[in-house]
Image: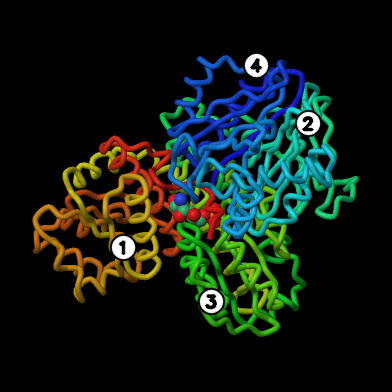
Amino acid sequence: MCGIVGYTGTNQASPFLLEGLQTLEYRGYDSAGVDILSPDGGLHGVKCAGRVATLVERCAQANLVGTCGIAHTRWATHGAPSDRNAHPHRDCSGTISLVHNGIIENFRELREELLANGHELVSDTDSEIIVHLVEESMQGPAKGDLLEAVRIATTRLQGSWALGVICTEQPGVLVCARKNSPLVITSDETGAYCASDITAIIGKSRHITQLEDGQLARLTPDGGIYVIGADGRHVPNPQTIDVSWSASEAKRGGYPDFMSKEVAEQPDAMTRLLANRLGDDGIVLDELNMTDEEVAAIDRIYIIACGTSWHVGLVAKEAIERWAKIPVSVEIASEFSYSSVLITEHTLCVVITQSGETADTLAAARRMKAMGCRVFSICNVIGCTAARESDGTIYVQAGPEICVASTKAYTSQMVASFLFALYLAHKNGNMGLDEVKEKYDALLEAPEAARTVLERSWQDRNAARAFQGRVSSLYLGRGVNATSAREGALKIKELSYLHAEAYPAGEMKHGSISMVEDGYPIVAVVPDDDTRAKMLSNIQEVKARGACVISVATDDDEDIAAQSDYVLWIPRMTEPMFNAIPAAVHLQLLARFVAVDRGRDVDKPRNLAKSVTVE
Ligand code: M6R
């Protein structure tokens, strides 16, 4: 949540900062602000409630001049979205400016202490206290050294932070710090840059420095990046990565919105992930970093995730239990702290997270690690915290996912989970090599199936009409299709703010069928698998009560077509479990059309943010 960006160099700062904020706006979009060190030696800035576009308009009038600055786009946690609570925040003297992403858990005590020390706090945020702590250490032990002042200030904090700080006393110096919130840095011949996410700086250089938890850095206009640890000692070789994707991949590229682009990218993303995954000894999954003996000994798996990634976990459970015969518990990360965990020395924890920064998921993974459990992660964002804290990571290589609603990451994470399940099944002797090859070949059908669905988007366009004027809907499925139903319902809720409930179809008659009335939209995920016969009965039951039925069905299934008002056709898949992939693409398209019909901003649904870095 929240995006921060900073620059110091020889160019004017505001164009990069505002462009960076636009790129990061998916992280939070209820208010935004910028502060620049201007040539007259002062700080000049603008901040306001609302979207980055409003800030851009205000900045055009403010004519901000200067080559060093910081900026922020906010997802409110402490204090309402307002001009006053927008970042950057300044100290009492107005000479230090700070942006923050994260949560300061001990802010109440610190606030009391600062007020008692005579500081004037003007916002309701937890972030503002940090700039006043920096002010105190600047005037005290740090003796005017901004890097040291920020370091001392962070020793007082509990919680999570990614910070960007500038001050008039040290013109051109930009200090950053991170703990439990992402922050990346890069430089080129015109200066140095920091941001919450690679997408904001990838246009400058693909060579990225990643601060470790607790580290700080001083950026200087010559492109200098000087990193220190929490103890103040210089870190001569900070962690760096070279990113393979380009700036254009993080842009909309002619599509009406990022969601359309990302939905369309699914076939290519899955193809990338599937390439060279079958070797002489079965599935190639070196990323797991475990010996064959260790893999064969796995006796239990905990999958931990949130939201759409949690749905991937439910699909993964089906595949692992069916093929590898290993019991799997799928845990919602935010609930995990309240559950008792039963692990042995052979238990594996799998975290599934697109961003790799979801606070609940990270907290749960840390709990498992602390209990001595090996952690494997399935992530999309290269170098994310989840990957860095795991014993092994498979990157799904879907490329930057900007739309808040997860689409291409979902299908790629499913593909990764299927590969993982096949790998386990072969290594622990529950599946022979021939069968592994058959399943892998069947999985190779997924990109083409997704492509076929994309060509049929007119079916979703038509079916979206069933939702017009409606306030509620029901998504039904059985087995793995019940998970597809859950994901479809989440997409509709998230994008169009229309109530949708996902139900295992057989459970409907125990209560929720009473909601059905004339024209009530019901989405039935009913591909040609072992759930089809019973699903057909369920469809007839709701049809008899006047429902408007939208079925996701396998090509040429005339029985389903006869009972449905709309059909979203998917190609026949060799392996029934893989129906979840083309079904997901249809349900994404359907959700987008419903949202567009309602005039929603599909990339930035209200109240949400792309990476949820608060627990
Ligand atoms: O980055 P993560 O995969 O950990 O994110 C988890 C959820 O916040 C995320 O999947 C969310 O549910 C999506 N916005 C749904 O489209």
The amino acid type found where label 2 is placed reads Val
Determine which quarter of the picture holds residue 439.
bottom right
Q: Which residue is mark 2?
A: 173
Q: Mark 4 or mark 2: name the one nearer the start of the chain.
A: 4
Amino acid at circle 3: Val
The residue shown at (24%, 59%) is 474
Q: Position of residue 205 (x, y in %)?
A: 74, 31
Kindly report the distance in space between the C-alpha atoms of the residues bearing marks 1 and 3.
Answer: 22 Å
Instruction: From the image, state whether disc 3 or disc 2 is nearer to you.
Output: 2
First reached walking from the N terminus: tag 4 or tag 3: 4
- What residue did someone put label 3 on? 328
**Residue at mark 3 to residue at mark 2: CA–CA distance:** 50 Å
Q: Is residue 345 left or right of residue 259?
A: right
- Mark 4 belongs to which amino acid? Val
Left or right: where does residue 171 sit relative to residue 361?
Answer: right
C-alpha gap between disc 4 and disc 1: 53 Å
Describe the element under mark 2 as helix, strand or loop: loop
Q: Which mark is residue 65?
A: 4
Q: Secondary structure at mark 4?
A: loop
Q: Specify few, some or many for label 1: CA neighbours under 10 Å numbering under 14, 14-19, or 20 or more.
A: many
Asked if the residues shown at circle 3 and circle 2 are in contact, with their CB atoms under 8 angstroms apart, the answer is no
Q: Amino acid at mark 1?
A: Ala
